[in-house]
Image (cartoon, rainbow, N blue to C red):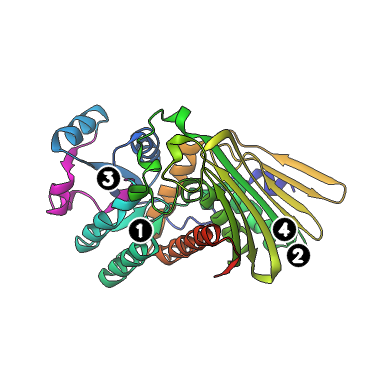
Amino acid sequence: MLDWIDNYEERTWQTTESGTVRYALLGLGWWTIDVALPAIESSELGEVTTLVSSSTEKATRLADENDVARGISYDEFHDGEASDEYDAVYVGTPNAYHLEYVETAADLDKAVLCEKPMEATVERAEAMVEACEAADVPLMIAYRMQTDPAVRRARELIADGFLGEPVSVYGHNSQPLLEMIPDPDQWRLDPDLSGYGTSVMDLGIYSINTTRFLLGRDPVSVHSEMASSHEAFAEMPDERASSLLVFEDDVQMISTSSQNAHEDTHLKITGTAGQIELRPAFHGECSLHLSRGDLSITIEHDSFDAEREMEEEFDYFADRLLGDEEIYPDGRHGLQDMRIIETLHESAERGEPLDL
């Protein structure tokens, strides 16, 4: 057990320690500038060479402020400006804009790391996958939990039988969106930009995708309930959402999420022999709690905040590119989440369970 703890943060996925992937960052909101950019700069295998925004002036100003070589506009990006100065793009724009930038990146023969959820609708996500496959460019969806050590170690334990047979999962993710960003007109509350909704698209996806990764199984049916009462959520069906998902082998999952609640994240998986819980789970500083018989262990690693998780994610992506290794959370993996989310919203609208 001591060896396991000593090697807790070991990058079991890493295949190379040399080389550099140069990034262009698209969508220069707070997450990209305050989290993604410093994560790349502190990573082992990446550097930011280009910033892309709505205007050359804004991109150049932010590039100067953050010691990045070049800033260009979206139009210039589409025209191929500075395309010899980066190897890959990170797409952090609102969901409904992902496709157009990914299609251009594919045309420019650039690898793509696209934020989740990968687009606003299943149809647009399918078009994204098709564009990257036709151009033979790598596409990875930015599920940062899949490279967090707590999640990877939990996955190993489940594969080794720590739980016995998985029985049930409970996942929750909530945050007070309007306190974090006090603007009722923000894009996450605009269905034209966000997609099917806001809470499941932006928060519930963490519980669902992390469960898929941990168990190596997918849902086969879903039943969802959604409600919105706050005026800022008037155009969104899911200020609050709860869902029952039945995974392969009859593993039952309850997932709850809300963009208008106290911040809280956890994921608990119970099996016939033991239990694994991530608490907190999704907003940084993920902690692992293990229970089996008389055994109870808690492992915390406060150094893994959101920026550190992103650093791992960017190094994983770069490692896959430099070593020509297969990407696990690829476009088709993300596309399955889009299909799940679409079906959850359809279930809530119809008021009945639906098969996937």
Which numbered disc covers residue 123? none
Instruction: Specify the segment rendered in magenta.
Output: 68-93
From the top left corner, tell me how far across and down residue 23 is, in percent.
Answer: 28, 47
Which residue occupies 75% across, 55% down?
270
Q: Residues within 10 Å of mark 3 (few under 14, many from 20)?
A: many
From the top left corner, tell me how far across and down residue 51 is, in percent.
Answer: 23, 40
What amino acid type should be assigned to the residue bearing mark 2? Answer: Glu
What amino acid type should be assigned to the residue bearing mark 1? Answer: Leu
Note whether residue 304 is visible: no
Write down the residue under mark 3: 26
Classify residue 6 as left or right of residue 206.
right
Give the secondary structure at mark 4: strand
Camera-side residue: 61 or 85? 61
Foreground mark, 4 or 1, reads: 4
Which residue occupies 61% across, 65% down?
353
Image: 271 above or below 308 = below
Which residue occupies 51% across, 47% down?
238
* Distance (Cα) linking label 2 and label 1: 37 Å
* Distance (Cα) linking label 3 and label 2: 43 Å
* Distance (Cα) linking label 4 and label 3: 39 Å
* Distance (Cα) linking label 3 and label 1: 22 Å
Which numbered disc covers residue 322? 1
Which numbered disc covers residue 168? 4
Q: Residues within 10 Å of mark 2 (few under 14, many from 20)?
A: some
Camera-side residue: 83 or 105? 105
